[in-house]
Image (cartoon, rainbow, N blue to C red):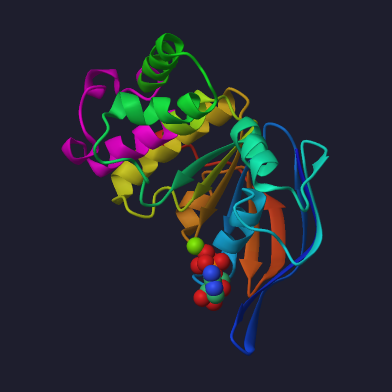
Amino acid sequence: MIDIKDLHKSYKTGATSLHVLKGINFNVKEGELVSIMGSSGSGKSTLLNILGMLDEADAGSYHLDNVPIKNLNEKIAAQYRNKFLGFIFQSFNLINYKTALDNVAMPLYYQGVSRGERLDRSMAYLEKVGLAPWARHLPNELSGGQKQRVAIARALASDPKVLLADEPTGALDTKTSYEVMDLIQGINDEGKTILVVTHEDDIAHMTKRIVNLKDGVIIDDSFVKQVRAKDHV
Ligand code: ADP
Ligand code: MG
């Protein structure tokens, strides 16, 4: 599903250049639940942004579902993003003046799905994450965990091939974090390919494989025995 080879990325600011990703190789098969773990500044978000086609590498190759991702114009890139990828962020990134239901429906609008089907599908996904009763509420009427559930429903609504989550539990307390991980595990049990970026060891162990990033290099990549989040809620 994801195949990257010898990926490099530097950030240039004026005369200085910061080499952030230093030759990353890895691939992810359909149905995997993988965490990218590392301390702050190790390059996790940079890597995830490249995988999410929000940024481009300086060197190396990236194939997403066998499609080479390189030098795409913004229109094609947006089409691929919509078709292949769902995003979940630490800060939820919901639109504050839209209801939970309308937040979930937004990406479908940009995909040209008709209004009736948008609302039906969005409601079904809100049900899936346990938030149907909150459909007409605004984000500021929801708890952090509920907001993240809305964001997960939004990411799923377009049925992406891969879910990319950047510190999805980073703004949540421990109990709520495990509830969100339980939901993510359930979605993976149904077959969705998911990448979770985290700096937290216990969250990483709730995935099935941990890719350890340090100073822009993968120092370990191992399958682990998955800890079920619901046993810890
Ligand atoms: P992580 O997500 O693991 O905390 P990041 O990928 O966000 O790490 O950042 C890796 C390094 O790159 C850090 O030193 C950060 O300051 C730097 N960095 C990230 N984004 C930019 C940017 N847009 N411009 C310049 N430097 C950046
Ligand atoms: Mg980060």
Q: Main secondary structure of the magenta part?
A: helix
Where residue 193 sits in the image (x, y, percent)? 64, 34
The quadrant of the rendering that contains the N terminus is top right
Residue 10 lies, with reference to residue 225, above or below; the image says below
| Residue drawn where x is 32% and y is 40% of the image | 95
Quick one: 91 or 107, which is closer to the camera?
107
| Residue 216 falls in image quadrant | bottom right
Q: Which residues are magenta?
A: 127-153
Residue 113 lies, with reference to residue 94, above or below; the image says above
Q: Please give left or right for residue 193 compared with residue 179 in the image.
A: right
| Residue drawn where x is 31% and y is 42% of the image | 176
Q: Residue furthest bottom?
A: 15
Badge count: 0
Was residue 131 drawn as part of the magenta stretch in this picture?
yes
Quick one: 143 or 37, which is closer to the camera?
143
Where residue 173 sits in the image (x, y, percent)? 28, 51
Quick one: 65 or 211, which is closer to the camera?
65
| Residue 147 falls in image quadrant | top left
